Image (tube, rainbow, N blue to C red):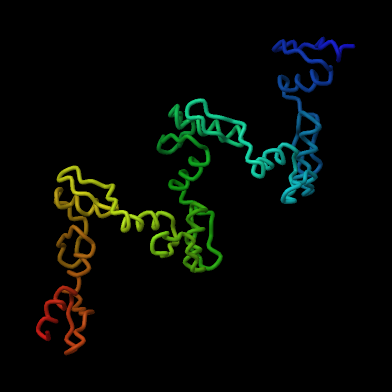
Amino acid sequence: MMRHSGEKPHQCSECLKIFKQKIKLVEHMRGHSGERPFQCSECQKNFSRRFALVQHMRSHSGDRPHHCSECLKNFKQKNELAIHMRSHTGKKPYQCSECLKKFAQQCNLVTHMRVHTGEKPYQCSECLKNFSQQCTLVTHMRSHTGEKPYQCSECPKRFSQKRHLVTHMRDHTGEKPYKCSECLKDFKQRYSLVQHMRVHTGEKPYQCSECLKNFSQQYNLVKHMRVHTGEKPYQCSECLKNFSQRSGLVDHMRVHSGEKPYQCSECLKNFSQSSTLVRHMKVHT
């Protein structure tokens, strides 16, 4: 009769929460006592509830009893299958109250809300920088530890982030997955395509705060700013002369090395700079 009447006679003496069944109260009380009577026979890890142990055991056995009817992918837990099914149905039950964006998983909504609140709950213990996501903090910590867990299978090079390894692998495979819709040129990285598209659109989003000149790429703005600041970060190791651009230093170093990589196709005379060769070619024309 209790089940039909909705009566909940079992109450927690710690937090006063009420349960319909005594077994549910017993399980709940372990949250207060810390008791974990169910132990894994493989790794001796303890659990407060039997079903949690059953789910854990699948990490040892590899058992995945929950099957997706669409793509036949298997899952260890029923809730993992339920979340996965949303990739087929397109269902996104969790909605942001600020911008109405929807998400398939509640954890993604929680992370997204920090865009609006500005909350950054994860702090680096080394430099005290804060992050909105734990995975971003984990990646950041590698800048302090020097850890590079992702290794290229083709060469000994290692990376701190998986996406950097993915991009690097394209140097070996030759893959260029990003194609320009205007001229069909292919690129290895998405940002290279974004920069290239400005050739077609004429967009120049980077503006000099001194003279208001616009540039299509940020590094061109950085180089341009040295005209105003007078900064010359590139120094010759031979005579200590400074240059505002790396290319200027490279050209200058040929004064010391004697290298002349530019050759006239008419008289085979060699030059240290391409601009000097261009001027020379006028002799022949």
In which image quadrant can residue 17 be found?
top right
User: Is residue 264 shown above or below 115?
Assistant: below
Quadrant placement of the C terminus: bottom left
Q: Most extreme residue toward the right, as rendered? A: 1
Horizontal placement of 75 versus 283: left or right? right
Q: Position of residue 250 (x, y in %)?
A: 22, 68
Is 2 situated left or right of 218 in this image?
A: right
Expressed as whole percent of the image width and height from the top left, the position of residue 86 reads 66, 40
On the picture, is 281 further left or further right than 88? left
In front: 87, or 120? 87
Query: At x 72% / y 41%, what residue is drawn?
Result: 81
- At 76% from the left and 28% from the top, the residue drawn is 48
Residue that sits furthest to the front in the current view: 182
Q: Residue at x 32, y 54 (%)?
A: 201
Percent coordinates x, y for residue 117 in the rendering: 45, 27
Viewport quadrant of the N terminus: top right
For residue 107, what is the image quadrant? top right
Query: Is 8 left, or right, of 129 in this rendering?
Result: right
Give residue 121's position: percent from left, percent from top. 48, 30
Residue at the extreme left: 283
Does residue 226 sit above or below 56 in this rendering? below
Which one is nearer the viewer's eye here, 5 or 9? 5
In the displayed image of the protein, which residue is found farthest to the bottom? 267
Residue occupying the point 20% across, 76% down = 257
For this rendering, which residue is in front, 124 or 167? 167
